[in-house]
Image (tube, rainbow, N blue to C red):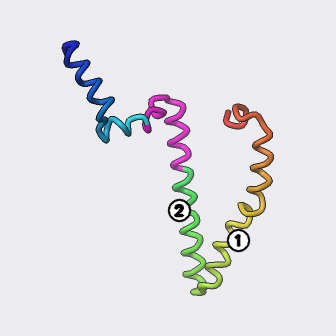
Amino acid sequence: MTPTEETTRTSTSITNPGKLESASHIWRALRHRNFRLFFGGQSISLICTWMTRIATAWLVYRLTGSAMLLGTVSFAGQIPTFLFAPFAGVWIDRLNRRQVLV
C-alpha cells in the first residue's frame, strides 16, 4: 500500500467510520488470552445456570401442575440475591478492586 492510499484510508476511516470499524473496539479485550478464558468460563457458567433454572421450573411444573408452586420455587431461587446483594455491594466497594478481581 502506498503512503497516499494509507493516508486516504486513515482519513476516511476517521471522518466516516464504517460499522465494522467503529465496532471493532468492542472486541479488543478478546485479544488477551486471560480475558478470553475468563469470558468463556463466565459464559459457560451463565448458560448452565439458566439451564438449571429452566430444568428446575420444568420439573416442578411437571410434577405438580401448579403455576403457584412454579412461581414460589422461582421466587425462592431469587431470595438469596435479594437479601445478600445490597450488603455484598457495600462490602465489595470497600475492598481493593484488583484483589477482588484477581
Horizontal and vertical percent position of residue 93:
76, 42
Crowding at label 1, few (<14), some or many (≥20) Cα neighbours within 10 Å? few
Point out the frontmost of discs 2 and 1: 1
- Does dot 1 land on a helix, a strand or a loop? helix
Are circles 2 and 1 on residues that touch, CB within 8 Å? no
Residue kind at label 2, given as amino acid type: Met
| Left or right: 15 as drawn, with respect to 28 | left
The residue segment tinted magenta is: 26-44
Q: Residue 3 falls in which quadrant of the image?
A: top left
Q: Which residue is pictured at 54% across the width and 75% down the height? A: 58
Above or below for 102 versus 3: below
Q: Residue 98 falls in which quadrant of the image?
A: top right
Q: Nearer the viewer, residue 49 or 93?
A: 93
Which residue is under mark 2? 51
Disc tally is 2
Name the quarter where the N terminus is drawn.
top left
Of the two numbered discs 2 and 1 on the same chain, state the one appearing first in sequence.
Answer: 2
**Farthest residue toward the bottom?**
65
Q: Nearer the viewer, residue 84 or 20?
A: 20
Horizontal and vertical percent position of residue 68:
64, 85
- Does dot 2 land on a helix, a strand or a loop? helix
Horizontal and vertical percent position of residue 73:
66, 75
Magenta residue check for 71: no
Q: Which residue is pictured at 67% across the width and 78% down the height? A: 72
**Farthest residue toward the top?**
3
Above or below for 8 versus 101: above
Residue kind at label 1, given as amino acid type: Ala
Q: Which residue is pictured at 29% across the width and 35% down the height? A: 16
| Left or right: 101 as drawn, with respect to 65 | right
Which residue is under mark 1? 76
